[in-house]
Amino acid sequence: MLTAQQALDHLLSNAVTVNESEMVNTQAALGRVLAEDVKSLVDVPPLDNTSMDGYAVRCADIATPGQILKIAQRIPAGSIGKQLEPGTAARIFTGAPVPPGADAVVMQEDCTVEGGSDQVTINVAPSSGQWIRRSGEDLTTGKTCLTAGTFLRPQELGVAASAGLTHLKVKRRVKVAAFFTGDELALPGEPLKPGGIYNSNRDTLLACLKSLGCDATDLGIVPDRLDATREALRKASKDHDLIITSGGVSVGEEDHIKPAVTAEGRLDLWQIAIKPGKPLAFGAVRKSSEPKDGEAWFVGLPGNPVSSFVTFLLFVRPFILRLQGREAKLPQSYLMRADFDWLKADRRNEFLRVKINDQGGLDLYPNQSSGVLTSASWGDGLVDCPPNQPIKSGELVKYIPFDALLK
């Protein structure tokens, strides 16, 4: 069996970043991937300004605390002050440009003004540059402020707006088609036949795809027939970069993924030394009979809901990140204290569903079966447990939060 790292390395070695891009309004770029470096159109801030409400002064006028200065002007944000003359101070408000001649700001809490007076007592001796934000200390005109490959979160859109950018060139969304095999499956709201179950993988995986910024197409539940599976693959390959299926990747008589993908393209069926998980199919499906039309990548996930979810996080997520042009690797793990015993060590690399408790340790969900999806809903992360390694309460273990795996 392949190790998790071997399987991931193989996947990533095949992934090729999408080439197409488009210009979108900056406000519409959330969750997209920047296609090119962008440069600031302005200095931010454009002028030296104050980070505090207070009084702009000349340090030379305040050798010692208690100096009294005349309040010669008032400068709110959005206004430009005049030259600050010796022996005077300017009442100034956060964000307002510092007037010429001033070299410090004293916050209002360190000053005293008698009611109706035009004089201020400076109760502390300021240092040069105090509470002044310098022009261009955030962004400089013509300098790169965001780099290609950046996943655009709210804070990146704020940087783009600060730089004066109305539009951004972004990678087109990765197009992913998903379908689900199993005659036992039904959609919520439909009646369940004897032996039937509701399809939880559909909602889980489509939500994972959308959280990654993919353009996800739901092709529904496909009957357990070879001809139906092949037809679904042909349909999915036409306009998509990646096809994901759930179920049918074993070698039973009702598992048609392997022969279907082999007939419509090419396939590797892997056994990966992880739990939950193990079976994973990877390959490609021809878009047409013409080689020039290319292929759509294919990943077949196991059908058990926790296995499907965990293998998506460990393998499909990094693969999609590489297609998007983003950094593709597993998130950083953290050493945390296990407040549980896990003494039945498996020969496979296990990923246990856990939750951080009020004492700063990790609790283990009592049922770690691959069919118990509530373990993932209850938990807030995974413990990466190496093969053949039991865990005793109090030991440090590698913890990976779901938040990092889903962003």
Image (cartoon, grey):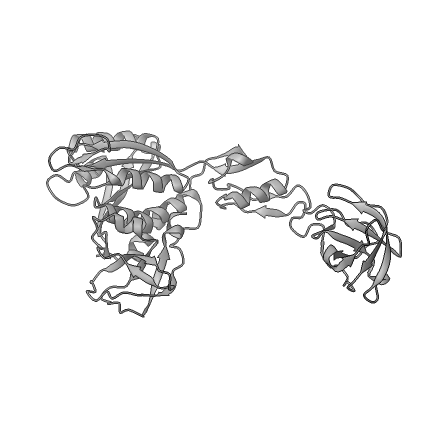
Q: Residue at x 38, y 48 (%)?
A: 406
Residue 151 left/right relative to 39: left
Q: Residue at x 36, y 47 (%)?
A: 317
Give the percent coordinates (x, y) of residue 104: 77, 57
**Which one is nearer the viewer's eye here, 355 or 208?**
355
Q: If the image is split into quadrants, where does the N terminus sit?
A: bottom left
Residue at the limit of the structure toward the front, as seen here = 115
One can see residue 297 in this view:
no
Residue 365: horizontal and vertical position, in percent?
A: 26, 56
x then y, percent, for residue 244: 29, 39
Left or right, 276 with reference to 328: left
The x and y percentages for residue 5 are 31, 57
Instruction: Name the residue located 53 percent from the left edge and 42 percent from the top edge.
Output: 36
Looking at this view, name the residue that lies furthest to the right: 86
- Asked if residue 60 can be seen in this view, the reply is yes
Image position of 77 with respect to 27: above or below: below
**Residue 320 in which image quadrant:** top left
Who is closer to the viewer here, 10 or 61? 61
Q: Nearer the viewer, residue 355 or 269?
A: 355
Q: Residue at x 51, y 42 (%)?
A: 34
Please indicate whether residue 140 sits to the left or right of residue 351 in the image.
right
Total numbered labels placed on residues in the image: 0
Question: Horizontally, is 325 left or right of 348 in the view?
Answer: right
